[in-house]
Image (cartoon, coloured by chain):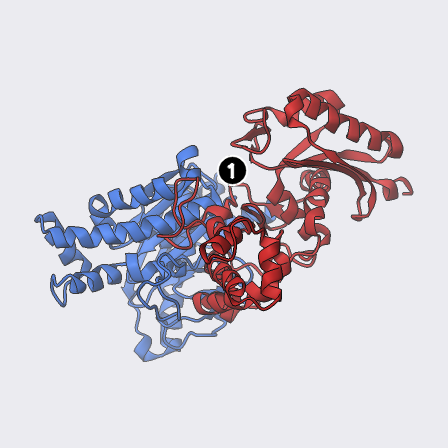
Chain colours: A blue, B red
Amino acid sequence: MFMSELAYTIGVDLGGTNLRAAAIDRSGRLLDKIAGATNFEEGRDAVLDDIAAAINQLRARYGSAGFHGIGIGVPGFINIEQGLIVGTHNLLGFDGFPMRDELARRLNTPVVLENDANAAALGEKWIGAGRDVNDLVLLTLGTGIGGGIISGGRVLHGYVGMAGELGHITVLPDGYPCGCGNNGCLEKHASATAVEAMAKLVTLGDNLTAKDVFHLAEEGNRNAQRVFEQMGMALGIGLATLINVFNFPLYLLSGGVLPAWKFFAPAMMEQIERRSFTFRNTKTRVEPATLGNQAGLFGAAYLPFLMQKLTAGA
Amino acid sequence: MFMSELAYTIGVDLGGTNLRAAAIDRSGRLLDKIAGATNFEEGRDAVLDDIAAAINQLRARYGSAGFHGIGIGVPGFINIEQGLIVGTHNLLGFDGFPMRDELARRLNTPVVLENDANAAALGEKWIGAGRDVNDLVLLTLGTGIGGGIISGGRVLHGYVGMAGELGHITVLPDGYPCGCGNNGCLEKHASATAVEAMAKLVTLGDNLTAKDVFHLAEEGNRNAQRVFEQMGMALGIGLATLINVFNFPLYLLSGGVLPAWKFFAPAMMEQIERRSFTFRNTKTRVEPATLGNQAGLFGAAYLPFLMQKLTAGA
């Protein structure tokens, strides 16, 4: 049937500073994209208006015949059953807000809501580095560390949608204190923020970004290189645990720290080798993700397709 | 239909020292059980003969009309696709052996093979402490620590069936060395063997069993109590990580150390509280399993029922 080739969805990636929406077809081809800033200071309604406007603009362009729905990735926990955003600090005014139903009402079409890291993992599974597997874990190494777990081709949600809080697994029980109440959370030792804090500790400089530390490492600065080795060690401890837990074929890394791969990966792989019998005995891959900061947008767009697939078949 | 009430399977729990087989009906009622010793010294064929004899005896008793198949739980990794036992040190002569197909051939009926901890988790999910949930993690605290993960009502297997190697997640990166090559594996700090080793370290005695240490703790011996506190701490670190990863509603503990619950649980819960934002914000339960050492037997018997269910519906 000719029409089926035009099948598309609209994916939305709502971040703390950026709002992106894209029309993407069933094969994962990006048809069109709209990007703008999110203006949370103007209030929740203004943000919802922006989202609705972007979606309507794309929908007007590509028509309703082949339109298959809307997927939205947001930073924060999702109460999947109720379609609520919960425990978000990045989206002012949205904590506890029934995002899914409100947008569905405004747009008069079903909306699927997902955590941004889960959406990114799903995007990588759909058309990125994970396209050949059904099971993978994605860690996004940014300001914090987010995690997404794809099991059997779907997002592992857990009880209320909070599965995959991989930034808060304990890698060093007596490590740096975390805002979550724990010590030694993965994200306190292996995020971009952790790289910056460690750079300060080794007196590289007080206000260096992770990118600055990377450039220093490139210039041969041993302390900068050591920062990434420490970061890689912590990441390796966490990944070894995930590999022992899941025995999945693929673990992907993405986010701002990724360019420093050559500086942190050796220490990371050394820990994984040593701490995971499963890694040594199965064909487990630990690799960079390939969609970059587009993963969440693609994953969001995939959500309505996946839902149809699950409803139809499975 | 009257016949369906007689539907039964045969579950087999093959251990390093014991062989148990039971006919169990669809509602989880134990019809009959045969127990004996495993004699690995007599060779693999003798063990297979014993298994086949026990199964045939039960099958003769309950007939073939309502017979729905055989499930077997074994200590060791299972290569699910090929039905092999791999990496077992407890079953002399069975490493790499095509257990599933060989037994199916001898018994002329399909056989489902499963790792023993996975089978135990499935048993608890079927008719034990997890009967009201679809997602749970079971840790068996014995000589080592085994793990079983039930996600969406089924065992999470991972790539080659090695998921749930929870005894080897790192809880203390610089902790006791483990035979797997790692330091600070959960099972080096929280198994019965760990309790015994720690009792030695605190000079309680050189050849105390975990049970002896428990009795000393009961008598008010502070060092014995401290051993369980240390063990509980390590267990809590591991459980907090699992809770952050899965956000499942239920985490169960079973095995030989379980009677010491009151001595290790306070330290365990303190770590979980502190290290898991997810625990504090969702209704997560950490509880003793209820089927004891029968869990694996029931879980094995459930395997053929589950397989039919998945083939028929899902």
Is A216 placed above or below B2 here? Answer: below
Q: Position of residue A66 (x, y in %)?
A: 47, 49
Residue type pointed to by label 1: Met
Please name whichever residue, A45 or A275, is drawn nearer the observer in this view of the structure.
A275
Quick one: quadrant of the C terminus of chain A? top right
Locate residue A175: give its quadrant. bottom left
Q: Position of residue B41 (x, y in %)?
A: 64, 25
Is B62 placed above or below B253 here? Answer: above
Q: Position of residue B178 (x, y in %)?
A: 43, 43
- At horizontal 39% and vertical 67% (from top left) the residue drawn is A182
- At horizontal 70% and vertical 56% (from top left) the residue drawn is B290
Q: Is residue B256 left or right of residue A263?
A: right
Q: Is residue B229 left or right of residue B53?
A: left
Read off the chain for label 1. Answer: A
The residue where tag 1 is placed is A1
Q: Position of residue B139 (x, y in %)?
A: 57, 52
Q: Is residue B222 left or right of residue A122?
A: right
Can residue B290 be seen by looking at this rendering? Answer: yes
* Number of other residues with Cα within 10 Å of mark 1, as a class: few under 14, some 14 to 19, many 20 or more: few
